[in-house]
Amino acid sequence: MELEKPQESSYLYCIRCGLCLAVCPTYREYLKETTSPRGRVALTRKGLEGKLELSPNLFEQMYGCFACMACNDVCPVGIRPADLALSMRQVEEQKHPKRWKQIVFKGLLSKAGRLELATLPLRLYEKLGVRRLVYWLRLDRLLPDRIRDLEAMLPRIPQRPLRRVLPEITEAHGEARYRVGYFLGCAQSLLFAEQSAATLRVLARNGCTVITPKEIECCGMPARGYGRMDLVRSQAMRNIAAFERRDVDVIVTDCATCGSMLKEYDSLFRDDPEWKERAAAFRSKVRDVSEFLAEIPLEKPSGRIESRVTYHDPCHLRRAQKVWREPRKILSLIDGLEFVELPEADWCCGSAGSQLITHYETSKKVLDRKLDHIEETGADTVASGCPGCRMQLETGLKRRGKPVRVVHPVALLDEAYGGVDGQRNH
Ligand code: SF4
Ligand code: SF4
């Protein structure tokens, strides 16, 4: 079978101007051409033209890319080095398929129930008090740095995944003005259930009847990051069909990563006219929750939050979806909240999916710079619309012993509405 690989036009016209070097977090850390967007474009070209062996070393540079997309935005001739690096991972996967990817992306992530079962030990770790004991006895200090950081990455794990607790239909409070489909991402359901419950309260309070299909699958981003586009397509097909059955006005998500993947569904089916059309109809409805809330008349919260808050832009929201004003607008609605802009707010935090696991040292360096900036702001709260970024930032802040909380901006809005009590009394 012929290899699915990037088109020649996606790398051929690089003029080697170097503009992309100035915005690349991996280049900034190592100052080596191979760790830069321009270098990755050159490696792709040489590899595909047969002038360089498609070796593990070459592919490693593609996996070393944080897919932050900053380079895509600055290239004057329209080269998209971030997309190229992802496409090259797909080339590698076709040449050397890895069994573990099949197990993780098809076996686990394709079925929410299986993923919930697989994460049961984590819930028991929290529920049986083992985690508290580890911290109380300061056993975490005995762990190697990398393991300690991975442990610290876990937020307070909810006892039940939100998918199991939420009703399929959450009724609007008062007059129902919008029929909203809610895409509940895996991380939101398993790790950030409380913050997503807050999202649903905010939507219902503002006139939305919210429909949450329980049979949806992973959005496809993890499989895309590891070059399994075949699985991304099958996940996309099942998700599109699930929302078609509900006939909703918009499809909202509070996960920046899910949102950016869902908005790419129409590009997955170029050679399939039927699915291309269905995916385009689906894509036209997708909104990040902050984007949707900025479009509708929003009730001004009566509560105050006395807090100094800064905001970190997730790459999947700012770069992929061009959504950055909207979360700030939401925060500006809250009385008492003092907003302070974060230096380099739109630079990657080093999370990039699984980089803290796969490229620990680089991820830590990138995170450290972000944490320095957070400290400069003097903020006691960091808001961000991506679960991966929030886990990364929390890990770093815990490591530094900083009592800074990390939340979704819509969770702050919910707090200003009074949270669960505010919902009861509304
Ligand atoms: S990828 Fe674009 S910005 Fe980077 S060196 Fe090539 S032409 Fe310049
Ligand atoms: S996506 Fe980010 S990390 Fe990757 S090459 Fe572009 S700027 Fe560098």
Image (cartoon, grey):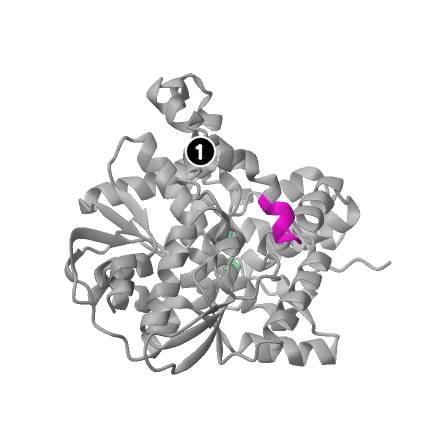
Residue 294 sits above or below residue 315 on the image: below
Whether residue 79 can be seen here: no
Label 1 crowding class (10 Å Cα cut-off): few <14, some 14-19, many 20+?
some
Task: Name the residue type under label 1.
Answer: Glu
Residue at 35% x, 64% y: name it.
201
Question: Looking at this view, is 153 or 54 the one in front?
Answer: 153
Res. 14 image quadrant: bottom right
Q: Is residue 115 magenta?
A: yes
Residue at 37% x, 62% y: name it.
199
How far from the left and from the top, in percent, is residue 293? 34, 72
The C terminus - image quarter: bottom left
Assess mark 1: CB under 8 A from ligand 2?
no
How far from the left and from the top, in percent, is residue 409? 31, 58
Residue at 32% x, 69% y: name it.
326
User: Which range is magenta?
Assistant: 109-116
Q: Residue furthest front?
A: 424
Relative horizontal placement of residue 97, taking residue 199 as reference (left or right):
right
Res. 53 image quadrant: top right
Name the residue tied to disc 1: 126
Whether residue 89 can be seen here: yes
SS majority, magenta: helix
Residue at 42% x, 49% y: name it.
192
Res. 403 image quadrant: top left
The N terminus - image quarter: bottom right
Q: Is residue 197 magenta?
A: no
Relative horizontal placement of residue 205, taking residue 67 as reference (left or right):
left
How far from the left and from the top, in percent, is residue 30? 46, 38
Q: Count the marks: how many?
A: 1
Relative horizontal placement of residue 176, taking residue 189 as reference (left or right):
left
Relative horizontal placement of residue 98, taking residue 341 as reference (left or right):
right
